[in-house]
Image: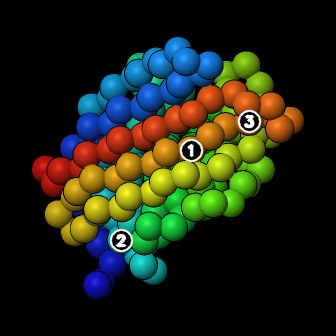
Amino acid sequence: MEKFIKPVMIKMKSIQNTSGEASEVELITEGSLSFDNGKYTVSYKDSEATGFEDSVTSVEVEEQRLASVVRVGSAPSNLVLEINKKHHCHYGTPYGDMMVGIYAHSIKNELDEKGGNLYLRYTIDINSSYISDNEIIMEVNQI
């Protein structure tokens, strides 16, 4: 497939489960879908709603095995999700930066040139202490 970049509408649900208490955040925003070197990338501008105003988040996914969530701007971060492998990653917040452990349980990539769905499920720890189980459910539609 040849490389491309297209405007899309992104509907995303982020679920965080901490010790049995789940919290959900939903976001609907415009962004872009691109394809290059065998990888799909979904990018969008963050807002007050996400807590990362003046930032851009990009989710890059390669097949069903590897994904990264990169945020540039006011609170930069770079999370790497690889099936059945733990990565130590930089995570920025408005209150400061930290190193977190990311262990990916599931990556379901159903993206194509028209959009599609992406599902990520992973666990976060800090200093090997459990923090939360997380899911990102993303629906991408061409505008």
Are circles 2 and 3 on residues that touch, CB within 8 Å?
A: no
Disc 1 secondary structure class: strand
Residue 57: image location, x then y, percent: 49, 43
Q: How crowded is mark 2: few (under 14 residues within 10 Å), some or many (20 or more)?
A: many
The residue sitting at 25% across, 46% down in the picture is 139
- Whether residue 67 can be seen here: yes
Figure check: 18 above or below 98: above
Residue 116, located in which quarter of the rendered image? bottom left
- Residues at marks 1 and 3 touching, judged by CB atoms closer than 8 Å: no
Considering every residue shown, the one lying at the far left of the view is: 143
Q: Can residue 74 be seen in this view?
A: no
The residue nearer to you, when weighing 72 against 15, is 15
- Residue 105 as seen in the image, left or right of residue 94: left
Query: In this figure, which colouring scheme has been used for the structure?
Result: rainbow
Residue 122: mark in rendering: 1
Q: What whole-number distance in Å separates the C-alpha atoms at marks 1 and 3?
A: 10 Å
Residue linked to disc 2: 35
Left or right of residue 119: residue 101: right
Residue at the extreme top: 21
Q: Which residue is drawn at 45% across and 57% down?
A: 107
**Mark 3: few/some/many CA within 10 Å (<14, 14-19, 20+):** some
| Percent position of residue 42, x then y | 38, 54
**Mark 1 vs mark 2, CA separation in Å:** 24 Å
Identify which residue is drawn at 62% across, 29% down.
132
Residue position for label 3: 125
The amino acid beneath tag 3 is Asp
User: Label 3's element?
Assistant: strand
- Amino acid tagged 1: Tyr
Element under disc 2: strand
